[in-house]
């Protein structure tokens, strides 16, 4: 609860269960202050199987801002496994529209499996009947159900209870003759994560989203975590009207007046989905998205990340004025040039199974036809971690050198004799090199430098971590040189530094860390 005003706020929070039973909390929130109300403190005795759900009414004698955060897991709040947050609703309405909903899995039996709930709250003094309709693709109404919600009570619909919704994606319309409040919650992977949001009260012809990202990004990755947190962005679209809608979507990327525009049709009373993975121009990019339609729509954005949709969030878009001119970017995003700078290791067993890191530029998404072939044989497994690194598992092959062929974004690059197959037990210079660390020539010192490459124009933020048996602490005044050029040091913390790489010459250069006139660590950085 936030009180942005200059007067203290007398706040009363009323919790209502499915029968309408009320439990209250009250507190004075000082001027220009924040307070947290924890329902468990007053509801703990009532939180039993089948009686854990409640709706909430917040009232105050001055204007306040209210949000709800919900966490779950063994021993929550300290043992948090998942969570979601949502703004409060200031005005009940007779219609609520949701573009997103999914029950089960779109590939039956696959992981993750989703559960969708429509949550209803009746703040009025009499019972109401709420009609909840579920719409699929091509104008098909998948299901309809009516729920009676008592005065001041909470109710809901679990999509799993309706057989026609199992293993389906759908949009939702909830209506009543008097105003009420509705939210939609989606949980997946056995309640490991979830999202919740209120719906729209009416559709709009234009919607905007500032956030969107597709693929992998180095800044979000951890070398110690095998899950590279690759992102998938979806835009569920609901056309509640009786006329098909011609929809134009503009994606604007970060390069300045660059992006891509797509046009498609959403049938009447239907749900469709835009999945940005299918647009190669957006591979491994961040973008803003704007929708313009000939008919009023509801548009949401859902972002998942990690293997098996490890986590995610969902939100309704921002409705924009009808007369706001939305125009395409004047240029397509610059096509990244496909290059390869390093294959590590360059030798592996004839029996296959060697994990090979390929570093370069211009790699596309794993799912969009990216391939790595060893001597014409596809890799056993492949994952593009981000646009400058991919990992492939070498297949079995006869002894000897083979070409590595990389296919991505419609471009093919052949690396002649870039990998050599050797019979198990054959000595290999690469056997102990995992490609992750640079061993310093300073005895007993190990250096991690991230990233290990950057543009020759300089300006790249580079993190350097030093580990040795002496527990070296980097002192203020430490200098870092790229070749003979000093880098700007922006952060020093124990054994870690952050520097700005100076301009350099294309190719590898030595990085030295100097403390009190002594070189304490060396590493290698590559300019491109």
Image (spheres, rainbow, N blue to C red):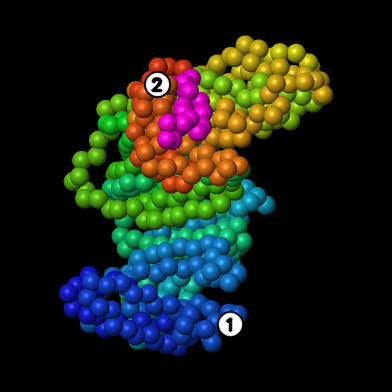
- Tag count: 2
Q: Is mark 1 on a helix, strand or loop?
A: loop
Q: Quadrant of residue 503?
A: top left
Residue 466 is tagged as none
What main secondary structure does the magenta stretch of the protein show? strand
The residue under label 1 is 48
Whole-angstrom CA distance, mark 2 to mark 1, is 68 Å
Q: Mark 2 points at which residue?
A: 484
Residue at 52%, 53% (x, y): give it: 311
Q: Is residue 464 visible?
A: yes
* Residue 526 drawn at (x, y percent): 47, 23
* Residue 10 lies in quadrant: bottom left
Residue count near mark 1 (Cα–Cα under 10 Å), binned few <14, some 14–19, many ≥20: few
Which residue extends farthest top? 416
The residue carrying pointer 2 sits among few (fewer than 14), some (14 to 19) or many (20 or more) residues within 10 Å by Cα, namely few
Quadrant in which the N terminus appears: bottom left
- What's the residue at 42%, 21% (across, down)? 483
Question: 273 or 371: which is nearer to us?
Answer: 371
Q: Please state the extent of the stretch shown in magenta in the rendering.
A: 508-528
């Amino acid at each position: 609860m936030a009180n942005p005003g200059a007067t203290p706020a007398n706040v009363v929070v009323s919790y209502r269960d499915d029968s309408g039973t009320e439990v209250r909390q009250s507190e004075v929130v000082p001027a220009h202050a924040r307070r947290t109300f924890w329902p468990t403190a007053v509801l703990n005795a009532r939180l039993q199987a089948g009686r854990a759900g409640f709706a909430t009414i917040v009232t105050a004698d001055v204007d306040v801002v209210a949000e709800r955060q919900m966490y779950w897991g063994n021993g929550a709040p300290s043992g948090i496994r998942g969570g979601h947050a949502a703004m409060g609703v200031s005005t009940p309405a007779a219609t609520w529209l949701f573009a997103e909903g999914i029950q089960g899995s779109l590939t039956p039996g696959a992981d993750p499996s989703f559960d969708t709930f429509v949550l209803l709250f009746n703040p009025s003094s009499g019972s109401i009947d709420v009609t909840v309709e579920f719409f699929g693709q091509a104008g098909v109404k998948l299901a309809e159900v009516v729920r009676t919600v008592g005065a001041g009570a909470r109710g809901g619909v679990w999509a799993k209870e309706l057989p026609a919704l199992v293993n389906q994606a759908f949009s939702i319309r909830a209506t009543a003759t008097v105003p009420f409040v509705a939210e939609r919650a989606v949980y997946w992977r056995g309640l490991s994560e979830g999202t919740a949001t209120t719906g729209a009260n009416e559709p709009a012809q234009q919607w905007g989203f500032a956030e969107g990202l597709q693929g992998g990004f180095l800044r979000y990755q951890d070398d110690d975590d095998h899950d590279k947190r690759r992102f998938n962005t979806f835009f569920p679209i609901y056309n509640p009207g009786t006329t098909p809608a011609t929809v134009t979507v503009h994606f604007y990327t970060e390069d300045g007046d660059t992006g891509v525009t797509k046009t498609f049709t959403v049938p009447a009373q239907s749900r469709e989905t835009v999945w940005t993975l299918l647009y190669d121009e957006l591979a491994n990019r961040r973008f803003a998205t704007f929708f313009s339609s000939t008919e009023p729509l509801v548009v949401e954005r859902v972002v998942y990340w990690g293997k098996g949709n490890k986590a995610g969030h969902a939100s309704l878009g921002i409705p924009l004025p009808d007369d706001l001119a939305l125009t395409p970017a004047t240029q397509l995003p610059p096509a990244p040039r496909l290059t390869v700078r390093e294959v590590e290791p360059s030798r592996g067993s004839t029996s296959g199974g060697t994990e090979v890191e390929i570093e370069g530029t211009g790699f596309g998404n794993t799912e969009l036809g990216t391939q790595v072939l060893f001597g014409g044989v596809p890799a056993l497994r492949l994952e593009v971690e981000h646009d400058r690194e991919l990992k492939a598992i070498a297949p079995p092959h006869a002894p000897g050198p083979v070409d590595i062929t990389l296919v991505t974004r419609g471009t093919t690059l052949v690396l002649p004799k870039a990998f050599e197959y050797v019979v198990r037990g054959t000595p290999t210079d690469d056997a102990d090199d995992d490609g992750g660390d640079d061993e310093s020539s300073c005895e007993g010192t190990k250096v991690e430098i991230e990233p290990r490459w950057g543009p020759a124009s300089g300006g790249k933020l580079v993190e350097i971590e030093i580990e040795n048996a002496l527990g070296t602490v980097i002192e203020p005044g430490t200098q870092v040189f790229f070749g003979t050029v000093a880098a700007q040091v922006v952060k020093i913390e124990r054994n870690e530094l952050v520097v700005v790489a100076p301009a350099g010459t294309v190719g590898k250069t030595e990085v030295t860390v100097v403390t009190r006139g002594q070189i304490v660590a060396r590493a290698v950085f590559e300019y491109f």
